[in-house]
Amino acid sequence: MTAPAWLGTPAGIRWLGFLGSACAAADAVLFGAPTFIRRGVSVMSILRGPNGVAILLLWIAGLTALCVAWWYGRRLTASRRWIVVTAALWIVPLLFVPPLASRDMYAYACQGALFDAGFNPSVVGVAAQPCPWIESVSVVWRDTPTPYGPLWIVLTGLAASFGSQAVALGIFRLYAVLAVAALALVVPALARRTGVPEERALWLVLCCPLVPVHFVGGGHNDALTIALLLAGLTLVAGRRPTGQLIAGGALVGAAIAVKTTVGVVLPFAALLAAGGLELTRDGLLRFLRRGGAVVGGAAAALVALSVVSGLGFGWAVALSGAGESRSWTSPPTAVGIAVNAVAKWFGVALDVVPAVRAVALLLLLVTLVAIWWHFRRGDALHGAGLACLAVIFFAPITQPWYLFWTLALFAVTTVRMRRLEVTIIASMFLILPDGDGAWKPLQVPFAFLVTGLAGWIAWRSVRWLRRPAPVGAPA
């Protein structure tokens, strides 16, 4: 099927994406994340409610328009300025509407209020003190410590210190916009250092539909995390002086201090700084000297932020609270749900989800070591992107916006990304405008589907790891 001619024009791409963003903004007003918790939200409950048909049509139309514009926009030959202006236009409709496709900003506000009141959100949940906006936080997360690092907790405390939920939400949107602006600067800079087309990288990252919908509309802190991470990688790429390597490591540490899961990138940042790891005396010394400067800078930043904030190091283990939520979108959770369902068919009551998740974390450690070793003399950024993908695959909770971690890293490499791009587009339709899962009623059938997919991916991954990594990729 041939695409319409206007999809090959800059104006057609730009205004189709803007239309999609406007539709999503309208949905945020009609049915975005409310300041109270709706129970049992599903496609059918939305259709039965006020403006139900309009809400779902706007949602589907908005996401479709943004995804189609992003997909066809990859073929354009456009300037950096045109791409930045286009991304800004797609963001503008979502700046001043209620939170969209997530209720996380409400949780951020209460976590900030907790910190502002002198508590440690890494140790206790928001229910530990009477947050004035606690009714807007999902009950699943009220007693769970925040899984974020000390820098983000301090930033949430700053937002909440004004005593107004509306102001706090506005500040979280400001953080997201500043992060996107930073990405507009660091993505081309890193692309230059890795020898890939700047415009291609910038389009893939800045105009990805995850940016307007989930990072600006939903206010997630991943945009800030990745902006800090790419800034750090930009400083360490190539033959840089030691001081610059330490500064780059500190920025990577700051990224970890926002979202701790991106810590898996740090060993690859060390490889990037050293130009790989050669198992010779000179190669080992170079890796220890240059890679050690990056790791030292990151460690120093994390220690400083932990001590200065007064939060200590509880954030390092706070991710354990992720087990409170269950969804088929996480492969380990899907496997557990599928096994539970089979056992139920035979009249046996089982709950193997915690055990499967524990095994998955062990497999994650093995996988990360294997990926690092595979890329010790290859493209470190490719390896870093795969490490992030492994975290997403083995995590007890998986959200669509997590895919942005890998997208941003792959965008500054020569890696083919077709499957990742298709996965991102498909993931956009997994969540309803208020943040609930769109396919919750089909959790068990989809769990079986994901279980089969996980098996296929594991088989392909083992075969892939047996092949040697390309040597001489850009450093």
Image (tube, rainbow, N blue to C red):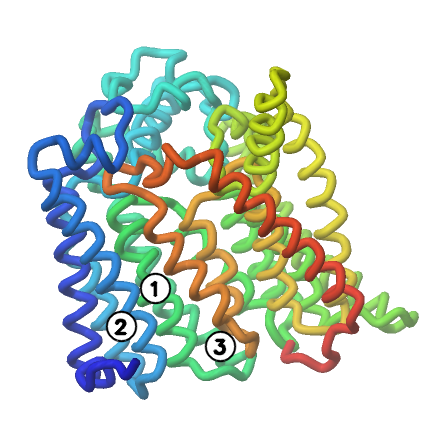
Q: Going 38% across and 14% down the picture, which residue do you hit?
A: 127
Question: Which of the two discs, 2 and 1, labels the residue nearer the N terminus?
Answer: 2
> In which quarter of the view is residue 376 placed?
bottom right
Badge 3: how crowded within 10 Å, few (<14), some, or many (20+)? many
Whether the residues at callouts 2 and 1 have beta carbons within 8 Å, the answer is no
Residue annotated with mark 3: 191
Q: Is residue 94 above or below residue 410?
A: above
Question: Which of the two discs, 2 and 3, labels the residue nearer the N terminus?
Answer: 2
Nearer to us in this view, 236 or 457: 457
Q: Which mark is residue 208?
A: 1
- Direction from residue 57 to residue 418 in the image, left or right: right
Q: Going 56% across and 75% down the picture, which residue do you hit?
A: 415
Nearer to us in this view, 349 or 230: 349
Q: Secondary structure at mark 2?
A: helix
What is the three-letter code of the residue carrying label 2?
Answer: Val
Q: Secondary structure at mark 1?
A: loop
Badge 2: how crowded within 10 Å, few (<14), some, or many (20+)? many
> In which quarter of the view is residue 471 placed?
bottom right
Q: Can residue 312 be seen from the camera position used here?
A: no
Whether the residues at callouts 2 and 3 have beta carbons within 8 Å, the answer is no
- Direction from residue 446 to residue 170 in the image, left or right: left
Q: Going 73% across and 43% down the picture, which residue do you hit?
A: 363
What is the three-letter code of the residue carrying label 1?
Answer: Cys
Residue annotated with mark 2: 84
Q: Secondary structure at mark 3?
A: helix
Q: Going 25% across and 37% down the picture, which residue do you hit?
A: 43
What is the three-letter code of the residue carrying label 3?
Answer: Ala
Q: In front: mark 1 or mark 3?
A: 1
Residue at the extreme left = 51
